[in-house]
């Protein structure tokens, strides 16, 4: 169940970040409102996961999955491109998430 709650937090965070980009530095009211509400939801659900998992693991998973998801959204929706160094760094983030999930005894499997 904690992974579903964490997944909701990641989805809310990526909605917030996408809306933040669309708000054009808070000059467009609807994307700004969506960003605020989505971030509130993201932090609420992130907080719920802390009942079940250590804060360091929760934050690593939340931020890593959020980075990967928003990178894909940035590429698809906003046409943002990545260079080889950025792709290498993102690959290391994925590797870190996999190591935590497969080998760490601090997560609930």
Image (spheres, rainbow, N blue to C red):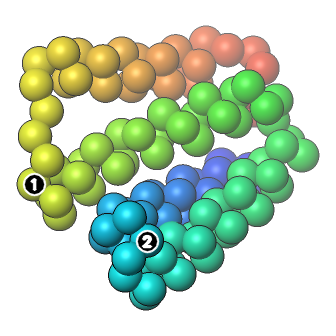
Task: Tell whether label 1 touches label 2 (CB within 8 Å).
Answer: no
- At a point 32% along the width and 68% down the height, the residue shown is 24
Residue in front for this viewpoint, 31 or 75: 31
The residue where tag 1 is placed is 79
Please tell me the numbered disc located at residue 34: none
Residue at 47% x, 40% y: name it: 65
Residue 10 x %, y %: 54, 54
Relative side of 23 to 100, left or right: left
Image height of 11 relative to 60, above or below:
below
The residue tagged 2 is 26
Which of the two marks, 2 or 1, is nearer to us in this view? 2
Task: Provide the secondary structure element on which disc 1 rests.
Answer: loop
Residue plotted at (59% across, 72% down): 36
29 over 20 or under it: above or below = below
Q: Earlier in the sequence, mark 2 or mark 1?
A: 2
Residue 15 in sight in this render: no
């Amino acid at each position: 169940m904690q992974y579903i709650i964490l997944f909701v937090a990641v989805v809310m965070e990526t909605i917030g970040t996408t809306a933040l980009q669309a708000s054009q530095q808070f000059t467009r009211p609807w994307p700004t409102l969506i960003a605020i509400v989505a971030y509130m939801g993201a932090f609420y659900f992130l907080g719920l996961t802390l009942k079940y998992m250590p804060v360091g693991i929760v934050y690593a998973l939340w931020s890593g999955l959020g980075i990967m998801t928003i990178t894909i959204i940035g590429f698809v929706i906003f046409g943002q491109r990545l260079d080889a160094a950025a792709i290498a760094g993102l690959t290391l983030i994925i590797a870190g998430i996999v190591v935590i999930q497969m080998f760490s005894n601090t997560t609930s499997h």
